Image: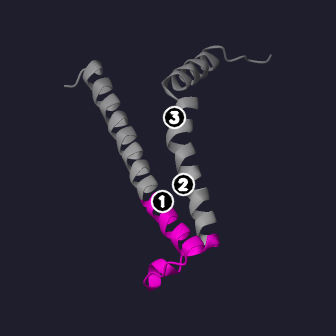
Amino acid sequence: METIENFERKQAEDLVRKRVKAVRNLYIHLCIYAVGVAIYIAKRYYGVQFFRPVGDINTFIMVIWTVIVVMDIVKVLVVSVVFGKKWEARKIKELTQNKEQKQIWK
């Protein structure tokens, strides 16, 4: 049988793995985005010609891609800070207290 400590440790390890994977994916996305920006700048301002798929990068695509990158950054970095472990613990405590203090109207 698993003890509560082992279960909590395993759960914490899973959360850490998910967090590390999310941060790693963000870094990969940022590297690819940096290459895309470099290609866009080279094409737009220096007139460098690229092969067909890469040459189709335009302003609309870069704006959409920038929005996606910003949303990814917010999801990975900001949300984890705002809604971190302290927030989760506080919410769990608040919800359990609400159940205990249930008011019955007479």
Q: Which residues are magenta?
A: 32-60
| Residue under pointer 3 | 80
Task: Left or right? Give the position of 11 relative to 45.
Answer: left
Residue type beneath disc 1: Tyr
Of residues 13 and 82, the one nearer the viewer is 82
Residue type beneath disc 3: Ser
Query: Taken as a whole, is the magenta stretch helix, strand or loop?
Result: helix
Q: Is residue 83 visible?
A: no
Q: Is residue 28 above or below residue 10?
A: below
Residue drawn at x 44%, y 62% as measured from the top left: 35
Residue type beneath disc 2: Val
Q: Which mark is residue 69?
A: 2
Residue 2: x and y in percent read: 22, 25
Check residue 29 for magenta coloring. Answer: no
Q: Is residue 75 above or below residue 55?
A: above
Do residues under tags 2 and 1 come within 8 Å of each other at their CB atoms? yes
Look at discs 2 and 3 and give the one toward the viewer: 2
Residue 47: x and y in percent read: 55, 78
Residue drawn at x 46%, y 53% as measured from the top left: 30
Q: Which mark is residue 105?
A: none
Of residues 100 and 9, the one nearer the viewer is 9
| Residue under pointer 1 | 33
Residue 68: x and y in percent read: 57, 57
List the single residue furthest toward the left: 1
Which quadrant holds the C terminus? top right
Q: Is residue 64 above or below residue 100?
A: below
- Secondary structure type for disc 1: helix
